[in-house]
């Protein structure tokens, strides 16, 4: 049973539709009202967007590439290997510091001071992965950024599309374990995101670095 089920046994759409009395609305009109009409299920003031986000959230499973958005503005990545454990490229005392290497840690240590993580969902062909469990505004910004035309993006796509391969959950963890103990960290060319995305796709890439370089 999810968090929403504790609030109300009806689904967000059914509950909102019932509250709005929108049985005769066309789909577009209902959709607009669904995303703007606030109400109070269980006495808690909540918006339909919040309910949809609650429904979308899911826990990481074995082989997922996960990440956290640090308060300093960057993202940190790792591979979830089950039972509350993560393999990531970081210092043993934080993301940065002495003795940066690929090692296994607990999900709590991976999160650090953050409360939530996101999961990367990779497209079937080469492209930027989608972040699941992020705020709707962040998704919109990411989509807009991904739509920005760039010759560098086109060249990178042509280079990487032939090498792109989605490994299974089991293979992803095997690839992560194969590099345990590595200590050749480089913020620009071999960081935690390069490592985590390589485990899933075979391509060592950091979308954060690409963005800083202008595409």
Image (cartoon, grey):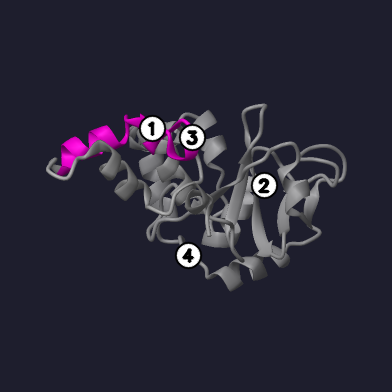
Q: Is residue 184 depicted above or below 142 in this figure?
A: below
Q: Nearer the viewer, residue 146 or 35?
A: 35
Q: Nearer the viewer, mark 4 or mark 1?
A: 1
For label 1, the residue is 39
Q: How many marks?
A: 4
Q: Position of residue 151 (x, y in %)?
A: 35, 36
Q: Earlier in the sequence, mark 4 or mark 1?
A: 1
Tell me if mark 3 has few (under 14), some (14-19) or many (20+) residues whose alpha carbon lies within 10 angstroms of its own. few
> Can residue 129 be spotted in the picture?
no
Q: Earlier in the sequence, mark 4 or mark 2?
A: 4
Q: Position of residue 204 (x, y in %)?
A: 57, 52
Q: Earlier in the sequence, mark 3 or mark 4?
A: 3
Q: CA distance from mark 4 to mark 2?
A: 18 Å
Q: Is residue 83 depicted above or below 156 in this figure?
A: below
Q: CA distance from mark 2 to mark 1?
A: 41 Å
Write down the quadrant of residue 23 in the picture: top left
Contact, mark 3 vs mark 4 (Cβ under 8 Å):
no
Q: Is 13 positioned to the left or the right of 112 in the image? A: left
Membership of 200 in magenta stretch: no
- Which disc, if any, is residue 166? 4
Contact, mark 4 vs mark 1 (Cβ under 8 Å):
no
Q: CA distance from mark 4 to mark 1?
A: 42 Å
**Stretch of the chain drawn in magenta:** 27-48
For label 3, the residue is 43
Tell me if mark 1 has few (under 14), some (14-19) or many (20+) residues whose alpha carbon lies within 10 angstroms of its own. some
Secondary element at tag 1: strand
- Which disc, if any, is residue 192? 2
């Amino acid at each position: 049973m999810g968090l929403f089920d504790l609030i109300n046994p009806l689904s967000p759409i059914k509950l909102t539709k019932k509250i709005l009395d929108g049985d005769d609305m066309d789909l577009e009109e209902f959709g607009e009202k669904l995303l703007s009409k606030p109400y109070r299920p269980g006495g808690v003031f909540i918006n339909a967007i919040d309910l949809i986000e609650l429904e979308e959230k899911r826990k990481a499973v074995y082989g997922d590439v996960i990440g956290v958005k640090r308060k300093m503005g960057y993202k940190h990545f790792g591979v979830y290997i089950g039972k509350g454990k993560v393999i990531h490229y970081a210092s043993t005392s934080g993301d940065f510091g002495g003795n940066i290497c690929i090692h296994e840690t607990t999900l709590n240590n991976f999160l650090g001071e953050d409360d939530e993580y996101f999961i990367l969902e990779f497209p079937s062909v080469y492209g930027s992965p989608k972040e699941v469990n992020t705020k709707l505004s962040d998704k919109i910004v990411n989509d807009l950024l991904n739509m920005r035309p760039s010759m560098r993006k086109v060249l990178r796509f042509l280079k990487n599309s032939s090498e792109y391969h989605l490994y299974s959950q089991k293979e992803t963890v095997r690839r992560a374990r194969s590099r345990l103990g590595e200590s050749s960290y480089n913020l620009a060319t071999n960081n935690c995101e390069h490592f985590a995305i390589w485990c899933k796709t075979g391509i060592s890439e950091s979308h954060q670095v690409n963005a800083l370089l202008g595409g």
